[in-house]
Each structure stands twice: as C-alpha cells, then as structure tokens.
Amino acid sequence: MPELPEVETTRRGIEPHLCGQIIQRLIVRQPRLRWPVPGQLARRVKRARIGEIARRAKYLLISIDNGTLLIHLGMSGSLRIIKDNTPPGPHDHIDLVLENGSRLRFRDPRRFGAWLWTAAPPETHPLLNSLGPEPLSSTFNADYLHRLARGRKRAIKSLLMDSHAVAGVGNIYANEALFLSGIHPARPAGRISQQRYDKLVAALKRVLNDAIRQGGTTLRDFTSGDGKPGYFQQSLSVYARQGKPCPVCTTPIRETRSAQRSTFYCPRCQR
Ligand SMILES: [Zn+2]
C-alpha cells in the first residue's frame, strides 16, 4: 500500500512533467473508484494550466487554473508519465493528456484510489479539513504531541496513527519510530515524558525522510513504461519481523494484532 513516503516520491517524480503544462483532455475509462470520478471532471480540467503539485497526508493536490484535483492512490494506485500513446492496460483507469503529448496515467487494480475535484481551497475539503499537522512539518513537534497526549489513556501507537493527531503516518512508520525511540506501542500516551516525545518525533521524521530519500534513489524512472509503481522496501527493524531477533538485543520481535492491524515491538527494548 502506498504510504506517505511513496506519495511524496510520486509527487516529486511527476511534478517536473506537469507543472506549467496545459491539459488537452482527461480520459476516464473506469469512473468507479473508491468514490465515483465526478462526471463533470473532464470538462472542468480541459485546456486548464497546471500549477503546483502539493501533498497533504496521502493526497496529491494538483492545482489547476480554476480548482484542485485531489488524487489518492488507495491500496494499489500508481501514477506515471508516458510520453507516447502506449495502449492502456486493463487497470489503467485514467489518463490526463497534456498538450505537449505526454500523459499522466493512473493505474489502480483494486480501485480504492480516488480522483476528486474541488473549486474551493483544498484545505477546506471534507477529506482534508480535520487532518492534523504534517509529520515532517515544524508544527509537528514534541511540545505539540506532549500537549495533545496529556491525560490520555489511549495507546501511543493508536494516537500516532490517528490522522486528526498527525496526518498520514502509516503502520510501518509508527512501528519503526516507536522501536527507534524505545517506547512500547501500548503505553498510554499521557504517560510519556516530553523528553521521550522528543525522541519519538525525531525518530518518526527520520524514518519518513529515510524512506523518501531511498525512494528517490531506488525508484524506477517515472517516465518508464514498465508500469511498475515506484514503491520500495526499506530496511526495517521490527515491522513484519515477528519471531526474528531484535537488531539491538536479539530478543525475538513480538507481534500483536488489534483492529486488523499488526503491531511489532521488542518486549525488552521498548517500555
Ligand atoms: Zn530489543
């Protein structure tokens, strides 16, 4: 599943090909994604100029003359730039065709992705207006998290994955950051000191930045036609390593499941 680093890497990969270009037309072959692609979308974006490409949580925001395209990759979506009219595959649901002849092609086998439109400022859109701060922004810091957690019995991992608390932190990165900062995932958020929050915030920013950096180097070219999305495997300390030795103390990594999400931790290093 594309996580925040993959979405950010995608943003960086497609931006130079889209920014400043004029849209010739939008081709929607399959409008039934997670939400239906708006019927008016093709008409709205036609002949408009593309401005900046931003990201909020795991949404890509393509700003256009008269509004913003909100794109989510869902479980299996990917975007790439194609320079010619390569015939679409069965899961290539949308092409954004530019006047210069290249296209942004959206592939999504499981169809949990989204292409939506808003004419209002995107931060006021219902999907975005209650999101917490971006994890890589300066507003997301130990003070903020410590204050938010005060008096709360809720487990720290569940707080980290709550998009109202901090936007777009996936399961992999929550698990890894808690390991790196030595915090037990089930520890009540209100019972963690400011100093430990300092470590946690730094660890979370580090794992996300490492993943983005790795994406930038290991990623296939966004203009290649192989259709492979640019997702990548980081070297992970605890995630999906249940039963394997902790990289610090060799105690077997433990796995617990709740609400269909797995938590991985070292019972010795994490308190
Ligand atoms: Zn350990």
Image (spheres, helix red, strand yellow):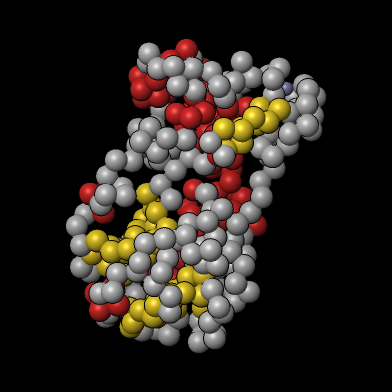
Quadrant hosting residue 251:
top right
Q: Where 213 sits versus 63, above or below?
A: above
Residues 35 and 125: in front is 35
* Whether residue 107 is visible: yes
Residue drawn at x 65%, y 57% is: 218
Q: Quadrant of the C terminus?
A: top right
Q: Please indicate whether residue 48 sits to the left or right of residue 143 in the image.
A: left
Q: x, y percentage for residue 196?
A: 51, 17
Name the residue located 66 percent from the left edge and 27 percent from the top edge. Answer: 265
224, above or below 134, in the image:
below
Q: Nearer the viewer, residue 65 or 185?
A: 185
76, above or below 213, in the image: below
Question: Between residues 110 and 118, which one lies in front from this camera angle?
Answer: 110
For the residue pair 96 and 54, the one nearer the viewer reads as 96
Q: Percent position (x, y) of residue 37? A: 34, 69
Quarter of the picture for ligand 1? Answer: top right
Specify whether 211 is left or right of 188: right
Tell me if residue 206 can be seen.
no
Question: In the rendering, at what x and y percent does residue 58 appear?
Answer: 43, 50
For the image, the number of numbered tags is 0
Q: Is residue 125 left or right of residue 135?
A: left
Residue at x 75%, y 24% (from the top left corner): 248
Identity of the residue drawn at 43% across and 75% down:
30
Residue most extreme to the front = 259
Q: Is residue 94 above or below residue 196?
A: below
**Quarter of the figure with residue 147:** top left
The image quadrant of residue 45 is: bottom left
- x%, y% of residue 197? 48, 21
